[in-house]
Image (tube, grey):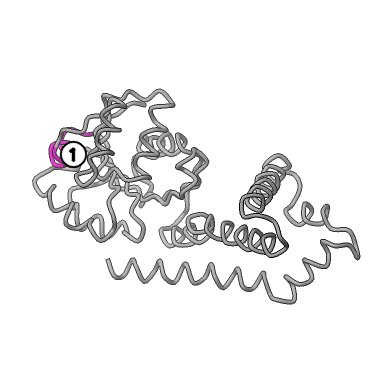
Amino acid sequence: MNKKIAFIGAGNMAFAIISGLLKSGYPAHLISANNKSNLQRREQLRQLGVKVDFSNRDAVAQADVVILAVKPQMMAEVCGEFACVDFSQKWVISVAAGMSVARLSALLPTADTIIRTMPNTPALIGEGMTGLYAKNAPNSTACRFAEQLFSAVGTYYWVENEAQLNQIIAITGSSPAYFFKFMEAIQSSAQNMGFSEEDARKLVQSVALGAAKMVVENPDLSLATLRENVTSKGGTTAQALAVFEQQGLTQMVDEAMQAVIRRAEEMEKAL
C-alpha cells in the first residue's frame, strides 16, 4: 500500500522509520521530510532519494499521510502552519508522546483519521515495539497502513483505549532504559571485581543478548520457567535472587512503572 507520506520532523525516530520503509521497498519519491535545524540530516535524506525541499505546508498539502514527528511542545506551533490545509481526506499519524487525540483534533479540526503511536528506541535498529491507538476504529485501511509503517522498524501492538498508551510507555517505551540501568549495575559490579570497563561491557552485553534470545526462541516457556532453569536450589544464582527478593525488586519495578504512567498523564494535561 503506497501513499504519499509527509514527515513533519525528521529526528532520529522519523529517520529510523524512513530508513525502514526504504529497506522494505517503499518508493523514496513518495516520501517527503524536512529538518529545518539539521542540515546534515537533510543531506542524508536527500541522498536516500527523499524529498526535502518542500515547506512543511506544501509537503502536507500534497500528502495522503501526514506523520507528526516533532517534539510535543512544538506541536501547536507546527500545526498552526496547516490552518489552511484540508485534512478530511488525509491520515494523520502522531509519534509525539503525551499528545492526546483530543488535543490533536483541536489543532487539526478537519482531520477525521488520527492514529496515535508510541514507538521505542529499538526501532532505530529495526527491533522496535510500537503501541498504536485509533479513536473510534477509523478507516481500517489507515490502520493497516500504520501497521505497514511500524512493521518496517519492528512490530506493533494495538491498545483498546487511549489511556493504555501511557501504560505502553511504561512497558515498552521507557523500559529499554530499565534494562540498560540493570546492565550498568552488573558492569559496575564486574569492574569492582577487577574487570576492565571494556571486558565488563562485553560480558554484560553478551549475556543480555543471549537471555533475550532465549526468551524469543522459547515462546512456550514462561519467564518464570526460564529463570528457574538457571536456578539450582541452594546454588549461586538462588543466592542472588534471594537478595533481589529481600530488596523488593518486583515491587520496586512496579512502582517505577506506575511513576512513568503518572508522569505521562501529567504531560498530557500540560499539553
Q: Position of residue 267 (x, y in %)?
A: 34, 68
Q: State the predominant SS element of the stretch in magenta.
A: helix
Q: Quadrant of the C terminus?
A: bottom left
Report which residue position mark 1 lands on: 60
Q: For this view, does 234 lie left or right of residue 125?
A: right
Q: Quadrant of residue 196?
A: bottom right
- Tell me: residue 149, above or below residue 200: above
Q: Amino acid at mark 1?
A: Val
Q: Quadrant of the N terminus?
A: top left
- Tell me: residue 45, above or below residue 113: above
Residue at the far right in the pictured view: 234
Q: Please give the name of the residue rendered at 34% of the width and 44% of the height, measured from the top-left corner.
A: 138
Q: Position of residue 188 (x, y in %)?
A: 63, 63
Question: Total label count?
Answer: 1
Residue at the far left in the pictured view: 84
Magenta segment boundaries in residue numbering: 55-63
**Which sits in the foreground, 16 or 251?**
16
**Which sits in the foreground, 9 or 92?**
9
Q: For this view, does 68 lie left or right of residue 167?
A: left
- Dot 1 crowding, Cα within 10 Å, few <14, some 14–19, many 20+: many
Q: Secondary structure at mark 1?
A: helix
